[in-house]
Amino acid sequence: MAATKASKEQKYDRQLRLWGDHGQEALENAHICLINATATGTEILKNLVLPGIGAFTIVDGHTVTGEDVGNNFFLSNSSIGKNRAQAATELLQELNSDVSGNFVEESPDKLLDNDPEFFHRFTIVIGVQLPESTCLRLGSVLWSAPVPFLVCKTYGLIGYMRLVVQEHTVIESHPDNALEDLRLDQPFAEFQNHIKSYDLDSMDKKDHSHTPWVIIVAKYLEKWLSEHNCLPPKNYKEKEAFRQFIREGILKNENGVPEDEENFEEAIKNVNTALNPTKIPSTVEDLFNSEQCNNITSQTSSFWVMLRAVKEFVHNEGTGSLPVRGTIPDMIADSQKFINLQNVYREKALQDTAAVSKHIECLLQSVGKPPESIAEKDIKLFCKNASFLRVVRCRSLAEEYSVDSVNKDEITSYMDNPDSEMVFYLMLRAIDRFYQQHSRYPGVYNYQVEEDISKLKLCVNSLLQEYSLNVNIKDDYIHEFCRYGAAEPHTVSAFLGGSAAQEAIKIISHQFVPFNNTFIYNAMSQTSATLQL
Amino acid sequence: MAETDEPEKKRRRVVELTEKMVVDGGNGSTCEWEGRWNHIKKFVERSGPFTHPEFEPGPESLQFMSETCKVLVIGAGGLGCELLKDLALSGFRNIHVVDMDTIDVSNLNRQFLFRPKDVGRPKADVAADFINSRIPGCRVVPHFKKIQDLDETFYRQFHIIVCGLDSVLARRWMNGMLLSLLVYEDGVLDQLSVIPLIDGGTEGFKGSARVIFPGMSACIDCTLELYPPQINFPMCTIASMPRLPEHCVEYVRVLLWPKEKPFGDDVTLDGDDPAHIQWVFEKSLERAAEFNITGVTYRLTQGVVKRVIPAVASTNAVIAAACATEVFKIATSAYTPLNNYMVFNDVDGLYTYTFEAERKENCSACSQIPLDLHFSSSSKLQEVLDYLTESASLQMKSPAVTATVDGKNKTLYLQSVASIEQRTRPNLSKTLKELRLTDGQELAVADVTTPQTMLFRLCFTS
């Protein structure tokens, strides 16, 4: 057992640095369903098996053809004639012995007919190359379960993904460029005391040059406020003056030449961001205003209970601000000064977290749940990430497809540029229509390409008419989609394979933010777009 | 999705197939089966409204791809494994792969051509074996070598080169090699001497893919500023005022290890040796305790010592796929290639940005004009060297400078050979005037960042 754990640590080391042990645990407890082991499907699954998901089940009623083997790394020519789910499971399973692979030799339509609850056991269902009718049926079953549903399609040089999840909460969104939480505009009591303990004017050179820039800015801000009627520097001119003010504080040698004080240079450089007012991000305000936050019941998930508690904190102990994050960036300073400053923030964060915990206790009590229902480490993580909380809510497929709720505005505004990625979405919808009418895709055989163009155009027009979309689709795109002949080239499948797998990992781990809700990839121009439909 | 025969027809076809099939996967000469290339054929045998102006539909493209076209993949790691698969399944059969590394356990989360039993074996060899046995007819030829160990004759044989490298240095070297192959006649570039270079790079959830036509479009050095130099912690922080757990680890790696030589006199720290890392970890904890710093873990220690870059399968899959699509476009002229740089990031949703990187007029690698170096004649040679290493557009590592002085070729400074380094070291503190260098004189500089010698022109400012 121990040996396996250690070797897993080694094997997964590079990804553990991205989503941590707890993220990995979520992956290892996940059971993923893939419908249709086409090239796109197996590429997605490969990128989930390699990082060690717990289990997968492939649902596929098709038999392997020569064409299937040609673009699929996980089918061999010896499997031609066999069931595709079984054939692919073998070669995917072989990638990682930590993962358990299963297959069901059945079409999803049959399963929906006989046993729709079959899909309820999965952490996420990924449907690949599905015809519209099957997709909508599945969408409806999974929406009510609720089980997250990721729809993927490779059609010629176009990749398509649609995420269908009612509500997906993210505590650890890991933003790329997060602002620091230093509270220089509203220093809390302990921070104020800490600043008081410094007297820049009486320090020796060594201490002066190794005082953290945060202290320097705080000190100079105090002076500025006393001289400017308690108003902080607001515009560029005032900020320049403030920077100059700090610069004058740099020690000078006997000849009046300023010394090399890197910490002061850091302070000057950071003035802009340091003076940013501490504000609750609008994303978090929106969450505070949502129904789930304000209507806590015994069914409410811990995310919303914690959020409500933070909201209570904001209105009470926090005096309008979120709990202090507790981290500070590295800065030029001697070890002791830095650690002391860091501890001021850390302790404040602990204090704020404790206050939030009390609110959580009250809330849990009010709905008859024990305080241990939410672990302390989860509360700590939540408070630390309070500024970065995100909730993704996708519209259902039913909403997207219904004439009454179709997102006309999104479609028509994108189509102001007739070459935008939106045209590919509309073409894929038209293709689905073609399949419904003709039980085949356009242009599969060479002789069909020419004659299918006009048939496909009829589908395009009926689609636009049905949804009252006043947009123009160039004939070139209709021709191109007939030319594709429903081909699924490997490189486009592989691009989608990586994209979809990572979105699935986001859903499973609740880390990083999934897209909302339609992603289109154009391999011709190597461009993409995310549409909200 | 793309097959619609009635069951009767399908069954007959499947029966026929098993009879025709050649049961020979390994040295596959004619391993084909019906429908194998259907997905590809639609792009090379049909005309379309978005194809490249020079595209001619027909069976010749597929034939060219499988019989004639030679593609070189540099790197058999995260990107390399994906590239080999993508190219093989796109119809390419003559593929070479170069990689100087052996397989490590930590590769297995994404380098899917390798298994636990392969740990320790050369990546190029194992990758080639796997592809050749999984994709009948494909002939991947491995080269367990450094890219610098191969010469122009080797590189010149390829139609297209795709890089899946993990170092800027190696990229610049490849870039320089392809530039050195360019043939100019009367100042006009012979396009036949241009070998397109597709370059992919990934780091965590970020990646990029770019298409370079050496001598024609922006090269690696034209956009060197996009790869800012790695910042190391200042020595005073490491030596006397650590604040972060990383500082503690660097202290042990840089200062304590050379002092204590814990595993022997000539034993350098090996990031892949768990015993070494364990020692560094324990000493880092001690250092951290001294300064009340928390957060030193084994994982953090290893990350700092090995300069680990986090990596997952998905990002590599995306970037390699984009690169392979470009190889396909260029080989078949089916579409206009990416012009010329795409960046990808899937931390928050999925984000791509595509733009045309511009050639730099005075690019140190591809502009052909000797660069001017402006120094006063009383500047010391050391200042010139500092400029070559610190300039954002040059970023040289250890330049060796030679010049023609008094009619003779003279090495002014060279670091890589100890005896020459010793002999030429005094030159560093001499002025350019003292070294008898003249205004307008050419300096030849060699460096690991490029296989070619770079020419500079000395311009005295005073």
Image (cartoon, rainbow, N blue to C red):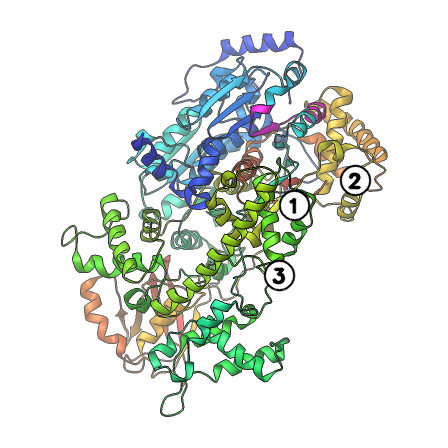
Upstream in sequence: badge 3 or badge 1: 1
Q: Which quarter of the rendering shows the C terminus of chain B?
A: bottom left
- Badge 1 marks a residue whose secondary structure is helix
- Read off the chain for label 1: A
- Badge 2 marks a residue whose secondary structure is loop
Image point 50% across, 74% down: which residue?
Answer: A218
Question: Residue B101, percent across and down?
Answer: 32, 42
Where A323 falls versus B99 (above or below)? below
Cα distance between the residues tagged 2 and 1: 44 Å
Asked which quadrant contains residue B247, the reply is bottom left
User: Between residues A73 and A335, which one lies in front from this camera angle?
Assistant: A335
For mark 3, what is the residue?
Answer: A320
Q: Which quarter of the rendering shows the N terminus of chain B?
A: top right
Q: Which residues are magenta?
A: A120-137
Question: Residue B441, percent across and down?
Answer: 37, 75
Identify the mark at residue B272; answer none if there is no mark. Answer: none
Residue A311 visible from this viewpoint: yes
Where B380 falls versus B364 (above or below)? below
Question: Residue A198, percent across and down?
Answer: 42, 77
Residue B88 visible from this viewpoint: no
Q: Are marks 2 and 3 on the same chain?
A: yes
| Closer to viewer: mark 2 or mark 3 | 3
Q: Counting other residues with Cα less than 10 Å from the Cα at mark 1, is it few (<14), some (14-19), or many (20 or more)?
A: many
For mark 2, what is the residue?
Answer: A473
Question: Left or right of B271: which side holds A451?
Answer: right
Disc 1 marks a residue whose amino acid type is Cys
Identify the mark at residue A293; answer none if there is no mark. Answer: 1
Residue B130 forms part of the magenta stretch: no
| Closer to viewer: mark 2 or mark 1 | 1
Disc 3 marks a residue whose amino acid type is Gly
